[in-house]
Image (cartoon, helix red, strand yellow):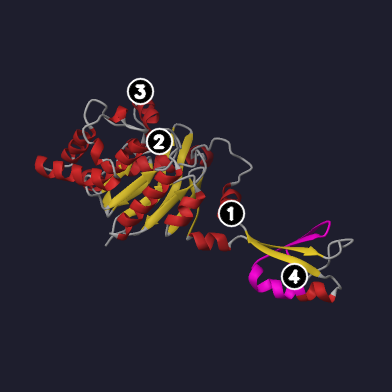
Amino acid sequence: MPPAIETVDLVKEYGDLRALQELSLTVEEGEFFGLLGPNGAGKTTFINTLVGLVRKTDGEARVFGHDVEDDYRQARDAIGLAPQEFNVDRFFSIREVLKNKAGYHGVPDDEAAKRADEVLKRVGIYDKRDERFDWLSGGMKRRLLLARALVTEPDLLILDEPTAGVDVQLRHDLWELVTELNEEGTTILLTTHYIEEAERLCDRVAIMNEGRKVTVATPDELKGRGTDTIALRLESAPASAPELGAYAHETTVSGDRLEVRVDDGGSTAPQLLNDLEAMGHEIVDLEITRTSLEEIFVDLTRSEDRTVTRSGAESAGGDDDTDESKTEPSSPEREREQEQEGVA
């Protein structure tokens, strides 16, 4: 089977602004894949390219082997999208909204009605089926966006900041539901600002920054890139930081407290204790802490220059001939497209 998502050197430009910079990414079928990055990293641009809201400037993008532009219908039918922004028809009951959504994808009326009821029950708002969107609470609106994404029975579920602004209970309910969907075989692409969410749910995560892929790894692999801190309280405050072996990357002293940064705190602690006791220090207390995934994320996405990225063609000084298939739409069309998507 082809990957659920495969992009090769994917580029999206808005004039001089390059929102995606030769992004190559593969999400395997059945994965729970996280997409992390600061605001402006290109996450929503990437999603909108997959679902056809944005036309790529260059490169390739496929969903289950279907090109997102040449095979648009097949690619789009495979995707269920729960967007970050509320974009629901407010003139129909939410049950009708779901039936209409299924109908757009060729599902017959009777089957669409059945699916609408099933997904409303699954997300927990079946008793609100005859109400309009504006009458729902914020949490119920989030549930409805997920129901709308599921009513077409997609093979790929894309969740763009699904728990933004929701309470803790709803967040955990949604975590449980999407985990069940993934265990049932649905591939899930999740964008989130909550590091805990990615760590808890995702098999692998890609970290993006300024339209580029910084790294792809499992949450455990990412945490392994950080260091541990061994904090010790000594019986007597040392006059200066003790000179330790090469295993100690950094040693700091504050009163009777000594902190030593090492690669693996668990395996290094015995040697550190032996060394300190050999120097005459008496250990009163010891604690080992690991660098959090959030700290690693911040470190990977930190950049001295967060200015607007110019297109590669301009910086390379390439020729002025423009391939018609790669040009942006006319100015009004491009403005509407940018309003729809934003560069985020």
**Is 74 above or below relative to 184?**
above
| Residue denoted by label 2 | 321
- SS state under label 3: helix
Of mark 2 and mark 4, the one earlier in the sequence is: 4
Q: Is residue 108 left or right of residue 152?
A: left
**Pointer 4 and pointer 1: residues touching (CB < 8 Å)?**
no
Residue type beneath disc 1? Ile
Q: Amino acid at mark 2?
A: Asp
Instruction: Measuring from the top left, give residue 253's x and y in whole percent.
Output: 81, 58
Q: Is residue 71 visible?
A: no
* Three-letter code for the amino acid on which mark 3 is drawn: Pro
State the separation of the CA atoms marked 4 and 1. Answer: 23 Å
The alpha-carbon separation of the residues under discs 2 and 3 comes to 23 Å
Question: Label 1: which residue?
Answer: 296
> Where 92 sits versus 287, above or below?
above
- Which amino acid, by three-letter code, is at mark 4? Ala
Marks 1 and 3: which is nearer the front? 1
Q: Is tag 2's residue or tag 3's residue first in the polypeptide sequence?
A: 2
Q: Secondary structure at mark 2?
A: loop
Region in magenta: 246-273
Residue 154 relative to residue 259: left or right = left
- Image location of residue 204, percent across then percent down: 44, 58
Mark 4 lies on residue: 246
Q: Which residue is mark 3?
A: 332
Label 2 – label 4 distance at C-alpha: 57 Å
Sequence-wise, the earlier of marks 4 and 1 is: 4
